[in-house]
Amino acid sequence: MCVLHLIDNGVTVGNEAGKIYIKYQSETKDVPIETIDGINVYGKPQLTTQCVEECMRRGIPISFFSSTGGYIGGFSGTNYVNVKRQRIQATFNLSDTSFELAKKIIGAKISNQISILRRFNRNYTSSEVILAEEETDKCGIQSNINNMLRYKKHIDSCETIPQLMGYEGISAREYFDGLGMLVNFEYSFDHRSKCPAKDPFNSMLSFGYSLLYKELYGIIVSKGLSPYLGFIHEDHEGHPALVSDMIEEWRAVIIDSMVMSLVNGKEMSLVDDFEGIQSEYPYYLTNTGRKKVLDKYNKKMDTTTSYIAGASKMSYRRALEYQVSSMIHAIEENDASRYNPIVIR
């Protein structure tokens, strides 16, 4: 099974005789439609109406991203709508159990961020990051970690979501400040900037988060939950709050570690893989850069992890599905113990 990533403008996609065909310039390729899990469209490739209809009938999601990699929306059909489950979900989101679960997820997020800082601080050498080791110490990565540990201790005593998210926010600032000390200085990363990304590192983070967000969105929908009924993030028109809730424990584990590997492994080219170099404009991935990140993302998602509590080894992609299924148990049984966020070491 596979996900089609359509990147180049000028690509046309249709379906015929049980196959998806992809036309680009003078070349045509086809893929059996039953082997496709989803279609991701970046920029302005064209899909025929017949192709969209067939995908909807088969429950194959089609997702649209902007030319800069931001997730816009998509089609998923109505095959998986489970009204009974969503009624229970809506009630659960107002319960004390949902707040208990929120604290578990945010606590896991902070723990995972600390683990990423420790991991890459251990792996740090002056040949990988052009900073002196004593300068890194002087900039206070251990201080960042200590502050995050202190904030994390307050999670269990939080009494409201705003209070909980306050600790999440100040921990995130400490985390990205520390992470910036471990990134090659050429990438000019010192804090998280979202829309727009103000440096190449942030552009990769944003694109990676969009990929993970879309994948988690699709799994949540396929399991019959509403992606819009969350219990941590505030309701906003058109905002899939449950996706925002459930992605929290995964951001550092999957995307941040992946981007650090790309950068410090010198797999990216500042000249060829980004737009915005030596200008005042935001930074975007080029098609070449986007393909590199996509390839790295898919490899990461296919690697196995043993960090899911009570489960055998599985791929990160399968782990996302496992966690959504666990969330369903927690919701339908009104029992926070049925959901254990991923916590890495």
Image (spheres, rainbow, N blue to C red):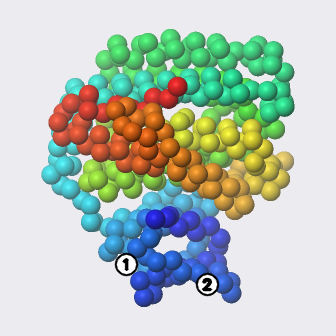
Sequence order check: which comes first, mark 2 or mark 1? 2
What residue do we see at 68% from left, 40% from top?
261
In screen coordinates, is 236 left or right of 261?
left
Q: Nearer the viewer, residue 195 or 53?
A: 53
Count of residue discs: 2
Left or right of 231? Residue 320 is right
Report the residue at 73% width, 33% height from top.
Answer: 183
Crowdedness near tag 1: few (<14), some (14–19) or many (≥20) residues, C-alpha within 10 Å: some
Give 91 or 257, whichever is nearer the viewer: 257
What is the three-letter code of the residue carrying label 1?
Glu
Kindly identify which numbered label has been placed on residue 284. Answer: none
Q: What is the x, y in percent for residue 29?
A: 59, 81
Residue plotted at (68% across, 87% down): 26
Where residue 291 sits: x, y (%)? 66, 59
The quarter of the displayed image where residue 222 is located: bottom left
Query: Where does label 1 land, which residue?
Result: 53
Query: From where the camera sits, is residue 188 visible?
Result: no
From this view, report whether residue 56 is shown above or below residue 49. Answer: above
Of marks 2 and 1, the one in the foreground: 2
- Horizontal and vertical percent position of residue 2: 49, 64
